[in-house]
Image (cartoon, rainbow, N blue to C red):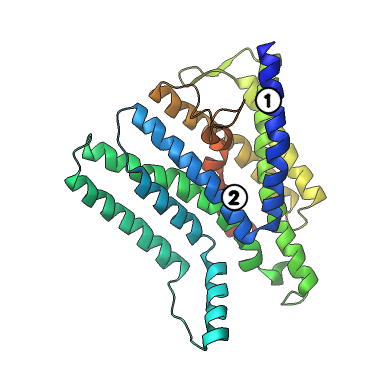
Amino acid sequence: MPKFESLSTRVLVALIAIPIILWLTMLGGYFFFFLIAIISSLTLYEFYGLAEAKGAAPLKTLGLIAGVIINAAFVYERFQVDIYQFILNHFGIHLAMFSQHQLLTVVLLKLLLLTMLVELFRTKGSPIINIATTISGVMIVSLCFGTLIFLRELFPYGFPVYKFFAIGYADDLQLAQINRWGGYTVIAVFASIWMCDTAAYFGGKTFGKHKFFVRVSPNKTWEGAVFGFIFSMLTMVTAKILVLGYLTFQHAIVLGVLIGVFGQLGDLIESRFKRDAGVKDSSSLIPGHGGVYDRFDSLVYISPIVYLYIDFVVLS
């Protein structure tokens, strides 16, 4: 009976959370940034909790602030345009601003230097371990989640219109289509990960006989991994047919393969962290699901890979 109660809780939470996530993803822009910034911050906080369970003392406040700024760097081009136009229109001033890459570089360097400086005067734990966990948390969580924001922002700000439309510029209807493609692309990534996880779970429960990675996750099987891999590809191909007209079937299959392989590796990486810390879940924040990191572990790892493939291969 407790298993069914847990399943009911998981389903109820999913029924509430998933529509909100999909809605904010389709809205894009600052709405999507705030969604990812919240998920990223909660995940980073849980990552630091795992580090503390191993005796580290990361600079959580500094890391969380830096993480949000790094997330913001990936929506900075939109912010830059809006602020520049506002200042120009209301005050007639041409404002000089950092480029996106300059902002990201400055934040990362300041985080590194500040962390070392604080640890110089701090007396809690090992400075080497504290610096390592503070910086690695921001790089693993905040930077990787930032690339998901970058992926969503590619479509209104980096989409090569001339490759997909007959004329060299896009009218309002075409721009709206491009923006929808951005939302659908991110949703397709979500759906592929969710379908991969679900298929791997039920496929492993039904047909699983050969253990996959006992040292890290004793319950996972090769059969479950194969089911997850197949359904990840099928989901991306289905998304291509239904809503992602800019993708070729070849690109859709490759994306499905990337998500099916590296998404499951991301799940194993977080399992390795939890096993090292001696905990079952990264937290108990989400009823029936564990922590935020538990729900988005695959997304943390796969986001940079999908972004790089779409930006430098599909849209190049």
Secondary structure category for the residue under label 2: helix
Q: Identity of the amino acid at label 2?
A: Leu
Secondary structure category for the residue under label 1: helix
Instruction: Work out whether residue 155 can be spotted.
Output: yes
Q: Position of residue 119 (x, y in %)?
A: 22, 45
83 is higher (above) or lower (below) than 73 = below
Give the distance between the C-alpha atoms of the residues marked 2 and 1, in whole angstroms. Answer: 22 Å
Rendered-image quadrant of the N terminus: top right
- Which residue is label 2 attached to? 35
Q: Identity of the amino acid at label 1?
A: Thr
Name of the residue lying farthest toward the bottom: 92
- Which residue is label 1 attached to? 9
Local packing at callout 1 (Cα closer than 10 Å; few below 14, some 14-19, many 20+) is some
> On the image, which quarter does residue 11 sit in?
top right
Nearer the N terminus, badge 2 or badge 1?
1
92 is higher (above) or lower (below) than 239 = below
205 is higher (above) or lower (below) than 130 = above
What residue is rendered at 46% in x and 81% in y? 95
**193 on left or right of 132:** right
